[in-house]
Image (cartoon, grey):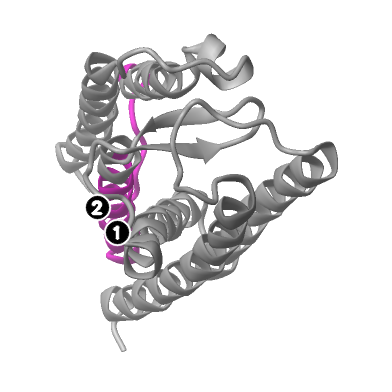
């Protein structure tokens, strides 16, 4: 079996794990919403009971450990492992909403708001935002894994790293910047789609720059 074909098979298994694990995640959310939002999930956020909050924070940390572990097992080189992490995280995030739609018929639209993460503070935003980020993660991650399997290294230049850091910062700010809504339980302000768009553009531009810079080098 060629390395590229083996990478494709590994990507399929990693994606299957992400989709299955997303069902576990969505099942937990079904129970939490039945407990805290029996009339349907709406913002502002309700404060979880302290024991439940602690369990949720630890569960989310454990989720990240599991996703990282899959990537470490699937890949052999640093960038290859990072690529598998992007894929498994992105598939997990996408199918989380697929399963919630199948179970609860939610979200009703891509603009419905959700609690995305709790570490270190709650992340909130419309479903469209994490979905778009997840799609970009899957696409870039799969391309990265296949590239490395084909024997082509990935060494982004300094400017690409700068784009990546700046893009990540903009995305994080779009999700956690409204501290009144995330920490004080008030109605959130309008979501900053400009930050989402800017973050995605910078990240994709940085990835493309790293991809093309290697293509121009002589073997």
Where is residue 201 drawn, in percent x and y?
Answer: 20, 25
Where is residue 20 drawn, in percent x and y?
Answer: 47, 74
Where is residue 105 drawn, in percent x and y?
Answer: 31, 61
Residue 146 part of the magenta segment = yes
Residue highlighted by disc 1:
142
What residue is shown at x 52% (from left), y 15% (from top)?
Answer: 186
In the visual, does 58 lie left or right of 85? right
Where is residue 50 drawn, in percent x and y?
Answer: 83, 37
Mark 1, residues whose alpha carbon is within 10 Å: few (<14), some, or many (≥20)?
Answer: many
**87 lies above or below 188:** below
What residue is shown at x 39% (from left), y 63% (from top)?
Answer: 104
Secondary element at image label 2 = helix
Query: Which of the 4 quarters of the picture holds residue 63?
Result: bottom right
**149 lies above or below 56:** below
Q: Main secondary structure of the magenta part?
A: helix
Q: Which mark is residue 139?
A: 2
Secondary element at image label 1 = helix
Q: Magenta residues, as a range?
A: 133-159
What residue is shown at x 45% (from left), y 49% (from top)?
Answer: 79
**Furthest-front residue in this view:** 39
What residue is shown at x 78% (from left), y 39% (from top)?
Answer: 49
In the visual, does 132 lie left or right of 25? left
Cβ–Cβ under 8 Å for marks 2 and 1: yes
Q: CA distance from mark 2 to mark 1?
A: 5 Å
């Amino acid at each position: 079996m060629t390395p590229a074909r083996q990478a494709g098979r590994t990507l399929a298994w990693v994606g299957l794990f992400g989709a299955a694990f997303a069902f576990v995640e969505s099942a937990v959310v079904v129970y939490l919403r039945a407990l805290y939002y029996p009339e349907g999930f709406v913002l502002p956020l309700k404060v979880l009971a302290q024991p439940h909050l602690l369990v949720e924070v630890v569960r989310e940390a454990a989720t990240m450990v599991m996703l990282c572990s899959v990537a470490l097992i699937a890949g052999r080189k640093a960038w290859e492992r990072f690529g598998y992490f992007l894929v498994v995280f992105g598939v997990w995030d996408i199918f989380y909403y697929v399963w919630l739609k199948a179970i609860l018929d939610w979200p009703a639209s891509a603009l419905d708001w959700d609690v995305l993460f709790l570490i270190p503070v709650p992340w909130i935003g419309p479903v469209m935002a994490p979905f778009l980020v997840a799609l970009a993660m899957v696409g870039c991650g799969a391309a990265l894994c296949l590239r490395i399997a084909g024997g082509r290294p990935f060494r982004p230049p300094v400017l690409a790293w700068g784009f990546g850091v700046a893009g990540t910062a903009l995305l994080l700010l779009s999700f956690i910047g409204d501290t009144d809504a995330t920490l004080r339980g008030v109605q959130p302000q309008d979501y900053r789609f400009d930050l989402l768009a800017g973050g995605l553009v910078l990240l994709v531009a940085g990835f493309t720059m790293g991809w093309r810079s290697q293509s121009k080098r002589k073997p």
